[in-house]
Amino acid sequence: MKPYDFNYFYEFECEYEALKNSKYDVLELCHKMIEFIQEKLKELGKWLKSHIFSTIQEEIQFFKELKPKMVSKIIYHQQLLKIEGSLPPTKKKKKKHYEKELVKLYEYGMNNKEFYEYYRSKGSYKDEEYFVRKQYKNLWDNCSHLISDSKLCTSHDFILATFIANEILEGYLEKKLEELNGNHLINNSLLNSNLNWTASKVDLVELIYALHLSGAINAGNCDVKEIATYFGKMFNVDIEDNIYRAFIDIKSRKTIQTKFLNTITENLNRKMKEDEL
């Protein structure tokens, strides 16, 4: 690989897409992908050990834009192999399995909240801190040399790669849940409502989870995301793609977790007391 040769990454993406479109089942494809990407990362690591970037900006670009995209692909397929390799047999258990994995993805973001917000906001003011190499080793005990050797990594390029992988995996898991739910899509003409939800989206998620867990809808025998889709259409608000993440936020509240439910309960009790006067 020539120094800072963008063609290397372009060729990698072409080979990756060709393999991705091959006719392997998900587990076999994961094995093939992991083997393929490992070889490419070895080549990259060998080049990187002796390469000197001409500017700080080049180094930042490499560790912020180029390397994480490649590393994210092996993280994704390693996670996917683990998830699908341990998939339970029944529909109900599969749904719980996928939902549990979704929660793990959101918790990873919460555990790295400051950097996750930096990543989501497309920040650049801390790039030299996050994406320039420093002289230390063994940053993570569970990583390969490409993400623990100070010549090959920065403090945050692996975390960034994990965020990218998790976003792809999130889409995969949500699609799987939709398939298990029978793709219960709502015809917009059936719910052409003039009612608009004017509280926050998190408030609506809190209400939906309360109804779901209480068994008030289909005796609890339905998926929470299906309920979210109906409520979203009914009240003209899009929440189904963020419902699991919002629930993590609700659980992470430091004071009162059920703020919205407490508020509407207080309002109802106040109204009933006023009517008695």
Image (cartoon, rainbow, N blue to C red):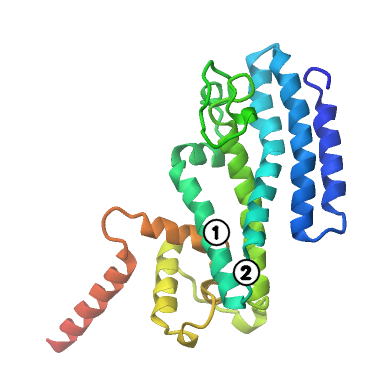
At label 1, the amino acid type is Leu
- Disc 1 target residue: 102
User: The N terminus appears in which quarter of the rendering?
Assistant: top right
Q: Secondary structure at mark 2?
A: helix
Residue 28 in the figure: left or right of residue 274 = right
For residue 43, above or below residue 237: above
Q: Are marks 1 and 2 in contact (CB under 8 Å)?
A: yes
Q: Which residue is found at the position 74% from the left and 52% from the top?
A: 30
Which quadrant of the structure image shows residue 92? bottom right
At label 2, the amino acid type is Leu
Q: Secondary structure at mark 1?
A: helix
- Disc 2 target residue: 177
Residue 242 visible in rendering: no
Residue 86 in percent (x, y) is at: 62, 62
For residue 56, above or below residue 118: above
Residue 17 in the figure: left or right of residue 105 = right
- Distance, label 1 to label 2, CA atoms, is 10 Å
Q: Give the class, few, some or many, for how many residues have Cα within 10 Å of label 2's Cα (few <14, many ≥20).
A: many
Residue 34 in percent (x, y) is at: 74, 44
Which quadrant of the structure image shows residue 193? bottom right
Q: Which residue is found at the position 65% from the left and 74% from the top?
A: 180
Q: Which residue is found at the position 67% from the left and 78% from the top?
A: 182
